[in-house]
């Protein structure tokens, strides 16, 4: 065995949705360090799995990617899977969303799910040469293709919670309704100016505003005002920890899941 063929590299498998994929080695700095995993060389790996690979022997031509084969699956990246439910005789299957996961998952155990529902399963087996992937029903979001089911599935996949922990709600409830004069130091008082929010009537985050006035020379002065939300979120407080965990407000066409309690 040549020296190059004995090298084992670890990385995350990224499926392309057409039978092949790529692995970016741990610590790689850019896509030029990716390895191309040809069809049937993924060795049972699913998109998002942490795998070990063995680079193929031979020279790499100009403009070509290095190729490799998956030799082991170190950690599964899909403990749960969402998709559309389909019934075939007495069997119930989940067809995964998107094109990254191509294997239908057989839903095992007693279920009250209907064909055409959108649901999530907890994986119990990722399949073998003789058995399909299997999982147990976790949650039913509604009818596949409906807006409501699509939103609930996205929230589930991204681990986004609608509700806030009690201690976070309590801190938000007791937030001061007026600004303490002690906090005025270092700030410019603009309360005598006409400042207009640019957020819509149904927005949850009213934190951007503008003002327009003439200066002493008759020139127009546009003011852009950004709320200092961090003033109300002390570092390390329940609000701060929850906002850090959420990272951002999540906007859909008809609703928003806020980063901070309303």
Image (tube, helix red, strand yellow):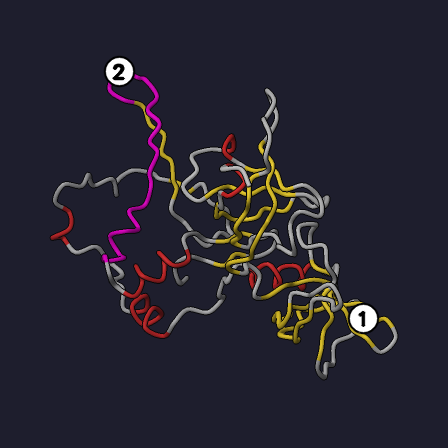
Q: Residue at label 1?
A: 115
Relative side of 204 to 42, left or right? left
Q: Earlier in the sequence, mark 1 or mark 2?
A: 1
Compute the Cα span from label 1 to label 2.
71 Å
> Looking at the image, is 204 positioned above or below residue 169?
above
Instruction: Find residue 21 and report its horizontal and vertical position in percent.
Output: 63, 43
Q: Nearer the viewer, residue 79 or 238?
A: 79
Q: Residue at label 2?
A: 217
Residue at 68% over, 65% down: 127
Instruction: Find residue 223 and report its horizontal and vertical position in percent.
Output: 33, 31
> Looking at the image, is 137 positioned above or below residue 133?
below
Asked whether the residues under the numbered discs 1 and 2 touch, taking CB atoms below 8 Å apart as contact, a structural biologist would say no
**Range of the magenta residues?**
215-235
Task: Find the residue positioned furthest to the front.
Answer: 1
Instruction: Find residue 239 and report its horizontal and vertical position in percent.
Output: 31, 62
Q: Is residue 234 magenta?
A: yes
Q: Is residue 111 magenta?
A: no
- Secondary structure found at label 2: loop
Residue at 63% over, 63% down: 81
Which label number is shown at residue 46? none
Q: Nearer the viewer, residue 176 or 48?
A: 48
Q: Which of marks 1 and 2 is in front?
A: 1
> Looking at the image, is 151 positioned above or below residue 107?
above
Q: In which quarter of the image is the C terminus?
A: bottom left
Residue at 61% over, 22% down: 61
Relative side of 20 to 50, left or right? right
Q: In which quarter of the image is the N terminus?
A: top right
- Secondary structure found at label 1: loop
């Amino acid at each position: 065995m040549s020296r190059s063929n004995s090298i084992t590299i670890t990385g995350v498998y990224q499926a392309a949705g057409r039978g092949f994929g790529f692995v970016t080695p741990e610590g790689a700095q850019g896509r030029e360090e990716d390895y191309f995993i040809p069809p049937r060389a993924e060795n049972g790996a699913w998109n998002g799995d942490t795998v070990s690979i063995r680079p193929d022997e031979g020279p790499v031509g100009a403009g070509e990617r290095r190729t490799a084969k998956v030799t082991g699956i170190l950690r599964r990246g899909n403990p749960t899977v969402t998709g559309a439910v389909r019934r075939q005789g007495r069997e119930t299957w989940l067809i995964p969303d998107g094109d990254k996961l191509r294997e239908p998952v057989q839903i095992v155990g007693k279920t009250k799910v209907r064909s055409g529902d959108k649901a999530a399963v907890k994986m119990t087996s990722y399949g073998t040469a003789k058995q399909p992937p299997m999982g147990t029903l976790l949650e039913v979001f509604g009818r596949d293709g409906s807006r409501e089911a699509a939103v609930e599935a996205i929230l589930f996949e991204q681990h986004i919670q609608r509700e806030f922990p009690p201690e976070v709600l309590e801190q938000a409830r007791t937030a001061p309704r007026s600004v303490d004069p002690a906090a005025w130091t270092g700030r410019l008082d603009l309360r005598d100016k006409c400042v207009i929010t640019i957020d819509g009537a149904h927005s949850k985050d009213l934190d951007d505003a503008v003002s327009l006035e003439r200066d002493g020379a008759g020139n127009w002065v546009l003011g852009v005002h950004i709320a200092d939300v961090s003033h109300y979120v002390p570092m390390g407080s329940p609000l701060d920890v929850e906002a850090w965990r959420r990272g951002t407000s999540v906007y859909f066409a008809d609703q928003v899941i806020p980063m901070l309690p309303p």
